[in-house]
Image (cartoon, rainbow, N blue to C red):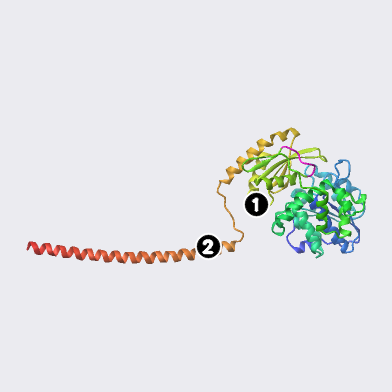
Amino acid sequence: MIIFKNRQTILNMRMSTPKSITILCDTDLHGMSCGITALYTLLNQGFNVNIYSHFSTNINEPATTPIGLANVVENLGMTDLIILDIPVDVRNPKRYIDVLINHAQYKGRVIWMDHHGHSQWIDVLNRSGVMAIMFGSSYDLSLAVPRMYNRVDSFVEKWALLGSVADFDTSIANKVSREFEEIVCDVVDSAYKQSLQQIKQQLNIPSNPSMGNIGELIHGIVTRRIETEQFIEVCKQVAKPIPLPQYTTLNNVVYTTQIPQSGLAWKTAWKLCCISQSKVAIVPTFNPRTNQYAIIIATYWRNEEDKTIIEEFIRQKFTGRQIVGHFGARSVALFSQNEINEIPNIARELDEYITAKAYTPRVTHLISDSYVAKAIAEDFKAILKELKEIHKQMTEMYREYLELKRRQVELLEKSTERERTRYD
């Protein structure tokens, strides 16, 4: 597995062939931001670039997902290929992997970039001619192509931040305000998933079915250089904040058994954590493309403290289930819709698990060892100074003690002498 570590790794990925380049990217806000930054960069480098990204609730349409992507790639001609933010399909990876390898062997170079894991399949891709790169964060993935060509400007930086906030990327937590987080997660994401056509109309994005509905939006944003501020303002006009379902709070957990509107389950979990101030939220969801029910178990994205506890609980409770998502924010596949009725019991078990773990002593590692060494040195100096003072005080007390004993001896000797004189 290739992992992004430094700038040279990125520079070595530059396209050098005269063929056209095709970008395929995921359909959520983060996938869209990856597509925007990549298309913007490559167009500015003078490449002949195509882009395709399509979201559809119709499973028979070529949606840009791990399942639908195989059909998309098979129909491509001679072109280099960049795939962004689309993980290896954990349900049925073979066909997806086969078409990527076949394209790399016969049609053009393939660079596959993601941040979701599946290292065993990444190793297979790399051994078979596909350059597969795993990034440590959504933000690094968003800026991968701009970094190839030293093209990180304010335009791509702002789109990378917007997509990374929508993806709950903790690496950019200190780069964005709470106000920006709330508008992206509560309004922009809702507008994007529920009012996509209205957004395109408001931005005057021309229709181009060959790019897919997300692809044509990306192309319009890049060619018209639409900034994130304008995009956000349009989203405010076409959508309201995410409606909250009926929910119940326990000590540490907030949960609902109501399925949110399509595509809004993750952000509903985020909002429930914010509203209730709970450590973790449980929200059911349904994916019409896979005809599958799942539950999302997620903590507030900036909350690092409880993520390990949540991971432990999910691993123990749901062994053998399909589990996807990010550290501290997981989607667990259900066997049937009836399992949604078990959410209150799951919430109670998770609450008890968090409570038990909260009182278990844990080792806390400070950010920098140099700070630890400095703190220890300062503490040692303070302790040494205190010991010297105590030693001084004890020495004085011992001197006074000896003086007192000397006087006692003198008094005793005088008393003994008087008694002897008296009897004589």
Q: Nearer the viewer, residue 394 or 21?
A: 394
In the rendered image, the vertical position of residue 166 relative to residue 416, given as above or below: above
Viewed as shown, does residue 143 lie left or right of 416? Answer: right
Q: CA distance from mark 1 to mark 2?
A: 26 Å
Label 2: few (<14), some or many (≥20) within 10 Å?
few
Q: Secondary structure at mark 2?
A: helix
* Disc 1 crowd, CA 10 A, few/some/many (<14, 14-19, 20+): few
Image location (x, y in percent) of residue 67:
83, 44
| Residue behind mark 1 | 304
Question: In front here: 126 or 260?
Answer: 260
* Quadrant in the rendering for residue 4: bottom right
Does the magenta segment cover residue 351? no
The quadrant of the picture occupied by the C terminus is bottom left
Residue that protrudes farthest toward the left in the picture = 424
Tell me the number on the disc at residue 376.
2
Amino acid at pointer 2: Ile
Residue sitting at x 59%, y 61%? 369
Asked if residue 106 shows in the view, the reply is yes
Task: Confirm whether the magenta stretch covers residue 259.
Answer: yes
Seen in the image, is 172 located left or right of residue 151?
left
Q: Residue 7, percent across and down?
A: 76, 63
Quarter of image, res 8? bottom right
- 205 left or right of 160? right
Residue drawn at 92 percent across, 49 percent down: 209
Q: What span is in magenta? A: 257-263
Q: Is residue 373 left or right of residue 399?
A: right
126, above or below 405, in the image: above
